[in-house]
Amino acid sequence: MSASDPVITVRGARATLGARPVLRGVDLTVERGEVVALLGANGSGKSTAVRSVIGQVPLTDGEIALFGTPLRRFRQWSRVGYVPQRTTAASGVPATVREVVSSGRLSRARFGLLSRADRAAVDRAIGLVGLADRAGDSVSALSGGQHQRVLIARALASEPELLIMDEPMAGVDLASQEILAGTLRDQVAAGTTVLLVLHELGAVEPLIDRAVVLRDGCVVHDGPPPKAVGQHALPGHDHVHPHAAHEPLRTGLLT
Ligand SMILES: Nc1ncnc2c1ncn2[C@@H]1O[C@H](COP(=O)(O)OP(=O)(O)OP(=O)(O)O)[C@@H](O)[C@H]1O
Ligand SMILES: [Mg+2]
């Protein structure tokens, strides 16, 4: 492990869920300080790919390393912040915003006790996502977008060097999206490495260094963000107008 090691290395990753091959030989490298977007249609394997990176999905073949350490030997989880894809299921556990965000700091706390510095980091993370005035409220009283901001604050609480977020903008209102984009901008400026699963580049497009596009569990693009892709090439867009014949590189990249 050295400072020049990539933060994330994925080589020939294959994974099967149920009987279904979901990752079919994925290669992905994220260098220190890079901001990489992982794009692709529903079911293309984006969430499975990032979950394999944090050890939640076992590979049937291939290898993964974090900060130059093979995943099976990696223990420094406080260096990694992870925001899972939002599900509609409520947690059901009554907890305040501060309690949920504090759970993200436990990997740094000794004996599970938060020091004054830990509590300050928790409050800082809550402030970063604009929820300082809601810190004592139950998360069950929050909107979906506010809840998402809590999950992001939880990931930020450990002051991670690597931030992995699975569709943080999905289902979040425009005001929250702006706050999230601003938070991300600050993290990137501070040198945090970011792997971001996205459906569309949207408000964070200017931050993205590189885009990796998955289709059916395979990488079909790894390079500059597909800037030329207009709104009409994005999933969910209805094709109501004809495309020029020389457009195939643009369309289909994300679908
Ligand atoms: N627990 C599971 N058991 C069986 N199949 C699964 C499981 N989780 C995901 N899959 C399948 O794996 C494939 C990839 O799913 P994944 O969640 O990685 O896609 P995704 O690119 O993140 O999609 P989305 O954009 O909808 O979030 C899909 O076909 C999905 O149905
Ligand atoms: Mg997903």
Image: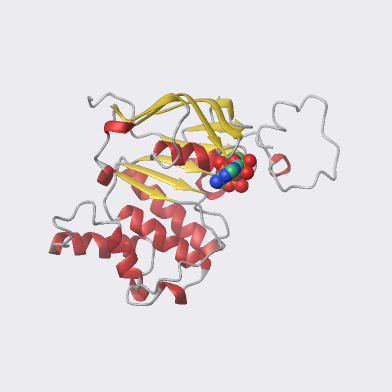
The quarter of the picture where residue 98 lies is bottom left
Q: In the displayed structure, would residue 36 be above or below residue 112?
A: above
The quarter of the picture where residue 139 lies is bottom left
Q: Nearer the viewer, residue 189 or 236?
A: 236
Tell me where residue 42 appears, x and y as whole percent. 64, 44
Residue 200 seen in this snapshot: no
Look at the image and name its color scheme.
secondary structure
At horizontal 46% and vertical 31% (from top left) the residue drawn is 59
Tell me where residue 149 appears, x and y as whole percent. 43, 61
At horizontal 56% and vertical 62% (from top left) the residue drawn is 88
In which quadrant of the rendered image does the N terminus lie? top left
Tell me where residue 97 appears, x and y as whole percent. 35, 70
Q: Nearer the viewer, residue 22 or 163?
A: 22
Position of residue 69 in the picture relative to residue 63 (left or right): left
Q: Nearer the viewer, residue 252 or 92?
A: 92
How many marks are shown on the rendered structure?
0
The quarter of the picture where residue 96 lies is bottom left
